[in-house]
Image (cartoon, helix red, strand yellow):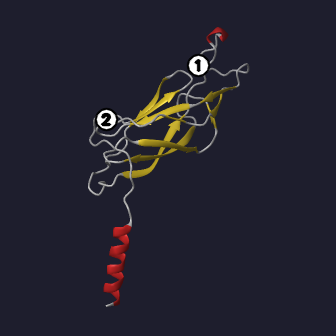
Amino acid sequence: MRFLITSVYMFFLASCISPPDYSDIPTLEFRSFSKLTMNQGVFEEDSVILTMFFTDGDGDFGISGQGLEKNIFIKDKRTNETFREYKAPFIPLEGAGNGISGTISIKLYSTCCIFPEASGIFPCEKSEEFPANDLELDVYIKDRAGNQSNVITTSKIKLNCN
């Protein structure tokens, strides 16, 4: 009898909780980098973990299958060019009727320092004259319906050039 009363109470308590009111257009928030300094490189010499929070009201985030389609896009603000693209794993729609939210963590490997063209120094060369770059990234995501999230700008990472 006590179990039945507890179960009925839990049912009514659960029915009073409102589902989150997320937009069908995904939203993205920058949370953190695992560290704020990284050494330049081409061959995965160094890395940081980028952590973001997302919501999607209709729960259609992630891509299934082995296709080449990507849904996480990262742009290097130094060049305004695509830095990396990733594919988030498929999230099934069952149980996602109230929307979804979660944390996205991505391991980003090092990149090259970029120097003023007049310096004559090529990217990824060591430079005493220009010891560091500020690496700042723009990030957005897309859901399966093609809705693009807001664009977030990360904090700056010091990219050591020497």
At mark 1, the secondary structure is loop
101 vs 125: above or below: below
User: What amino acid type is highlighted by mark number 1?
Assistant: Pro
Pick the quarter of the image with the C terminus. top right
User: x, y percentage for residue 54?
Assistant: 44, 46
Tell me the residue that label 2 is attached to. Answer: 146
Check the image and name the residue furthest to the bottom: 1
Disc 1 crowd, CA 10 A, few/some/many (<14, 14-19, 20+): some
User: x, y percentage for residue 10?
Assistant: 36, 76
User: Quadrant of residue 130 in the image?
Assistant: top right
User: Quadrant of residue 156 in the image?
Assistant: top right
For the residues carrying marks 2 and 1, which lies nearer the camera in this image? 2
- The residue lying at 31 percent from left, 41 percent from top is 63
- The residue lying at 56 percent from left, 38 percent from top is 47
120 vs 66: above or below: above
Tell me the residue that label 1 is attached to. Answer: 123
User: x, y percentage for residue 14?
Assistant: 36, 70
At mark 2, the secondary structure is loop
Q: Nearer the viewer, residue 28 or 63?
A: 28
User: What amino acid type is highlighted by mark number 2?
Assistant: Gly
The answer for how far apart the CA atoms under marks 2 and 1 are is 35 Å
- The residue lying at 39 percent from left, 55 percent from top is 20
- The residue lying at 33 percent from left, 69 percent from top is 15
**Disc nearer the start of the sequence (2/1):** 1
35 vs 99: above or below: above
